[in-house]
Image (cartoon, grey):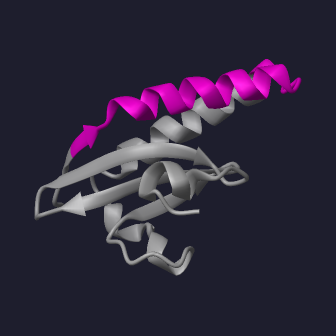
Amino acid sequence: MKEYNLVIHEEVNIDIDNAVEYKRENGTYEANIQKFKKEVKKTIRSLKTSPKAGSNLSNRVDIDTKKKYFLVDNYLLVFEIIGEKEVHVFGLYPTRSNWTKRDFGYD
């Protein structure tokens, strides 16, 4: 089985921390927060072997891009397969935010 090298951009860890903080501020049970974090990490690890299983981001928004995503809870984990050996993980975006502006400069 082919394995890809993961390149996790610094923003991803910040995004995870922000998601956890948001969940805490909104009264999410700690057990559910831990479950969310575990699911995000599991999804990131899965990119090593099956990044092509992700959905094409260009099907979700009116932007021509090679980026893909997985939906984790109410968050989009956005990544791109680069060449034959790398997967770059760019961010974890709340689906109810203006994440297209942050990632693409698009409103």
In this rendered view, identify the residue nearer to me: 13 or 34: 13
Q: Quick check: 37 left or right of 12?
A: right
| Quadrant of the frame with the C terminus | bottom right
Residue name at image x 59 percent, y 30 percent: 37
Q: x%, y% of residue 60? A: 57, 74
Residue 56: tell me if it is visible. Answer: no
Residue located 57% across and 46% down the image: 93
Q: What stretch is highlighted in magenta?
A: 6-30
Is residue 105 at least partly visible in the picture? yes
Q: Spot the residue most to the right.
A: 27
Whole-percent x, y for residue 26 in the image: 86, 27
Using residue 57 as the reference point, say whether residue 51 is left or right of it.
Answer: left
Q: Does the magenta stretch include residue 66?
A: no
User: What secondary structure do most residues of the magenta stretch adopt?
Assistant: helix
Q: Is residue 54 above or below residue 91?
A: below
Rendered residue at 53%/39% (across/down): 40
List x then y, in percent, for residue 84. 10, 64
- Of residues 64 and 44, which is closer to you in this image? 64
Q: Is residue 78 above or below residue 9?
A: below
